[in-house]
Amino acid sequence: MRVQHRHIIYVQGYDPRGLAQYYRMFRTELRKFGRLYQLTATVSRPQAAGDGETASWTIETKASDWQTRTRYDFLRWEDLIQRDLAAPIWRTVFQATWLYWRAVFSGTITRFWKAHWRFATFVTYPHFVLLIEALCVLGIACAFAKGLEALGIPDPFSIAAAAALFAAGLGAALKYTENRTYLLYLLSDAIWTWEFSNRKRPEWDQRIDRFAQYLVNVARKGEAEEIVVVGHSSGSFLGSEIVARALKLDPSLGRHGPRVVLLTIGGNFPIVGFHAASQDFRDHLRLLAVEPSIDWIDCQSRKDVMNFFPFDPIAGHGIDVGAARRNPTIVPVPFREIIKPEHYKLFRWKFFRVHFQFVMANELPHAYDFFMIVCGPIPLSERMARPKAALAFATGDAAAREHAWKVLETAVPGRVDAADLGEMEPSARRRG
């Protein structure tokens, strides 16, 4: 079946910028997508729901021999995130530092290192920068204390003045270097993931439950041929929670009406799943691993240090479901093959920019193309099962597209063809 009407439910990560910034990026990248494939794609303005927790827009896409209509829902968390980031600097620093060393002594950081050393380095990075800034400010404070001592100021007063200078200086350093280091943002993110893992953020759980009910309602209406729940970054584990909880509300979720697909991109499941207290989360992963009515695609990139690559979200958490397992299908995404070389060199070391490539337009045609997933006529599971045919359908002439469609019709959802996958992977494996 060629998809004519698709429903995307997008689950953002821990990003305080929210709807306005994301919509601007989406609209800009949609134009690039249209130019790349020589098609027409128009997008409506976002309409916010009455509760302010979701916003939606519509994309109309037309090519020479196909057209689609996509409803795009953006699930909002920015109000909760901005509240976190408004916390006093001193509280953020002390709480994040305490939680980091607690994770070290509990063995969680060691599990990170074993699973993905680059992500463990990324988790440690803000604490290393914090230490460097603290030592620099401490040096200035000590020199100030020595100066007061040379002037004959009594030790209690000089020590108190130096301590005050240290506290004020460190706070100022953290605040005014934030745009370069992202230190306070990353520390707030770490606090949030720990609290979420330990079920200490009821407002997040309550919103996830409401989003799960929303997914059930969308599926029951059956207005689209395909529903894709997209979870990017931390949205990967939030999205999996939404789908798992929706399955508990309606065990026949994927057995009636539209096909339901979970697409996780740039995921970081272990930052929740590796905590001992996250048994409920691991149970939800187990549920998704064996659910035959839901297709789960997990896209990972070696170049993105903010996702785990390579990582199996099921086996990596010690979950063994034997022959009953059918999810997820793990797909490597080589960014080097979807971005022009001159542009790739410009941002390859900008970690946040690399991380967002998952949801940005390609510069070169490729089987992984976020906007083709959103706007194209090929169902997502078939696209991932036959990536070479999906690419041929997007770039070939009429005869090539017709042949590609016949190949896609034979694709088995949830199973990636080994030969096709080999075409997607070598640059990421050999060149990094």
Image (cartoon, rainbow, N blue to C red):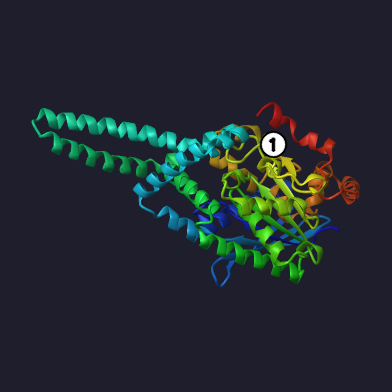
In-image side of 359 versus 193 (left or right): right
Quadrant position of residue 44:
bottom right
Q: How many numbered discs sit on the rendered protein?
A: 1
Residue placed at 91% from the left, 46% from the top?
403
Looking at the picture, tell me which residue is in the foreground, 1 or 214.
Answer: 214
Looking at the picture, tell me which residue is in the foreground, 182 or 198.
Answer: 198
Looking at the picture, tell me which residue is in the foreground, 5 or 249.
Answer: 249
Residue placed at 40% from the left, 55% from the top?
86
Quadrant position of residue 211:
bottom right
Q: Residue 222: where, in percent of width, then height?
A: 77, 69
**Kind of residue indicated by mark 1:** Pro
Quarter containing the N terminus: bottom right
User: Label 1's element?
Assistant: loop
Residue placed at 56% from the left, 41% from the top?
353
Q: Residue 93: where, in percent of width, then height?
A: 38, 44
> Can you identify the residue that label 1 sits on?
334
Tell me if I can see residue 182 in this picture.
yes
In-image side of 78 versus 153 (left or right): right
Q: Residue 274: where, in percent of width, then height?
A: 59, 43
Quadrant position of residue 252:
bottom right
- Residue at the far left: name it: 152
In-image side of 276 versus 225 (left or right): left
Q: Residue 152: where, in percent of width, then height?
A: 8, 31
Quarter containing the C terminus: top right
Residue placed at 69% from the left, 36% from the top?
334
Within 10 Å of disc 1 (Cα), the crowding (few <14, some 14-19, many 20+) is: many
Tell me if I can see residue 46 in this picture.
no
